[in-house]
């Protein structure tokens, strides 16, 4: 399934690829499987403007959210290099790209 992931990644924007690769680096650094919370954490620490604005409009405390996510990053030791949530996320991104003509 690594070939499938690589194929899906090739279709992403450069920004999405950077987030994915940064999340993977974070997972590897902590010897954990790459999961969706790694990507969310990367988005939060990189201050991705649109996501941050959306979360703030929903009255989400960004710092509390980061603090809540971080234990998952350091405590969920790797069983697989990439968690199923990432595969599902990439598949959904691919479907959305096709739907919107990206």
Image (tube, rainbow, N blue to C red):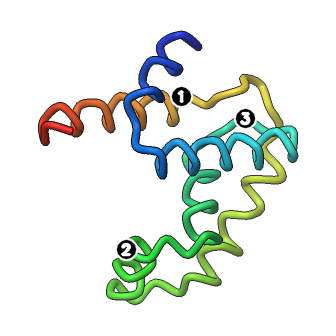
Seen in the picture, residue 58 relative to 80 is either above or below; the reply is below
The quadrant in which the C terminus is found is top left
Q: Which residue is mark 3?
A: 33
Tell me the residue at 61%/31% (across/down).
83
- Residue 95 horizontal/vertical position (percent): 23, 31
Q: Which mark is residue 50?
A: 2
- Residue 84 horizontal/vertical position (percent): 54, 28
Tell me the residue at 70%/40% (across/down).
24
- Residue 31 horizontal/vertical position (percent): 86, 38
Residue projecting furthest to the front: 14
Judging from the image, what secondary structure is the residue with disc 1 in? helix
Q: Nearer the viewer, mark 2 or mark 3?
A: 2
Q: Which residue is mark 1?
A: 84
Judging from the image, what secondary structure is the residue with disc 2 in? helix
Q: Dot 3 surroundings within 10 Å: few (below 14), some, or many (20 or more)?
A: many
Q: Are marks 1 and 3 in contact (CB under 8 Å)?
A: no
Q: Is residue 56 left or right of residue 101?
A: right
Residue 64 lies in quadrant: bottom right
**Looking at the image, which is closer to me, 20 or 62?**
20
**Looking at the image, which is closer to me, 6 or 85?**
6
Q: CA distance from mark 1 to mark 2?
A: 26 Å
Q: Is tag 1's residue or tag 3's residue first in the polypeptide sequence?
A: 3
Q: Is tag 1's residue or tag 2's residue first in the polypeptide sequence?
A: 2
Q: CA distance from mark 1 to mark 3?
A: 10 Å
Judging from the image, what secondary structure is the residue with disc 3 in? loop
């Amino acid at each position: 399934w690594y070939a499938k992931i690589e194929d899906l990644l090739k279709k992403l924007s450069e920004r999405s690829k950077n987030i994915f690769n940064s999340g993977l680096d974070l997972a590897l650094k902590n010897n954990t499987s790459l999961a969706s919370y790694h990507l969310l954490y990367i988005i939060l620490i990189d201050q991705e403007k649109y996501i941050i604005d959306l979360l703030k409009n929903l009255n989400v405390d960004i710092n509390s959210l980061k603090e809540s996510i971080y234990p998952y990053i350091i405590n969920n030791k790797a069983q697989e290099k990439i968690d199923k949530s990432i595969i599902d996320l990439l598949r959904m991104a691919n479907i959305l790209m096709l739907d919107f003509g990206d």
